[in-house]
Image (cartoon, helix red, strand yellow):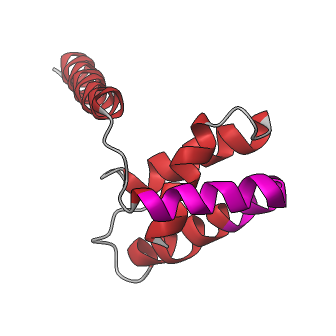
Amino acid sequence: MKRDLVVLVLAARDPAVPLTAKVLAGVVAAYALSPIDLIPDFIPVLGMLDDLLLVPVGIWLVLRLIPPRVQADLRERAAAQGQLPRSRAAATVIVALWILGSVWLGLAAHRYLQRGA
């Protein structure tokens, strides 16, 4: 699955990949690599099911959308690269989302407390 994630990251940046597959590849790779889960892992059973079901289904769907010849080239490049590329931009976006979410939650809590007092 790790190699397939590298393929997805490369597919999201490859001009030979159709736009739909690029967008979906970016979303699936970002979800798989993000520390933020749709269902938190501390929820028994369901927390692990999203990782065990959503990510493989997303990978399968993206690979079905990529033409076989392009997919073979991406797999070769992924095997040569061996590891996931690092992206400071992606890390910055994730940190910014966490900060914005925290600020929004804080403001919502403040408004709620102001109305109740």
User: How would you classify the magenta stretch by its main secondary structure?
Assistant: helix
Residue at image x 60%, y 40%? 12
Does residue 101 lie above or below 37 as drawn?
A: above
Q: In which quarter of the image is residue 54?
A: bottom right
Residue at image x 75%, y 41%? 17
Counting the numbered discs, the total is: 0
- Image position, residue 26 (x, y; %): 56, 42
Residue located farthest toward the left when viewing the structure as drawn: 117
- Image position, residue 11 (x, y; %): 62, 45
Q: Is residue 54 visible?
A: yes
Q: In which quarter of the image is residue 96?
A: top left
- Image position, residue 50 (x, y; %): 50, 69
For the record, the magenta segment spans 60-80
Q: Nearer the viewer, residue 34 or 63?
A: 63
- Image position, residue 31 (x, y; %): 47, 51
Is 76 displayed left or right of 111 in the figure?
right
Q: Which of 84 and 89 is in front in this view?
A: 84
Residue at image x 23%, y 21%? 103
Does residue 112 lie above or below 12 as drawn?
A: above
Residue 68 on the magenta span: yes
Residue 72 on the magenta span: yes
Is 15 displayed left or right of 67 in the figure?
left
Residue located farthest toward the bottom when viewing the structure as drawn: 45
Is 68 displayed left or right of 31 in the figure?
right
Does residue 46 lie above or below 34 as drawn?
A: below
Q: Can residue 62 be seen in this view?
A: no
Q: In which quarter of the image is the C terminus?
A: top left
Q: Which of 74 and 94 is in front in this view?
A: 74
Is 109 displayed left or right of 19 in the figure?
left
Does residue 89 lie above or below 27 as drawn?
A: above
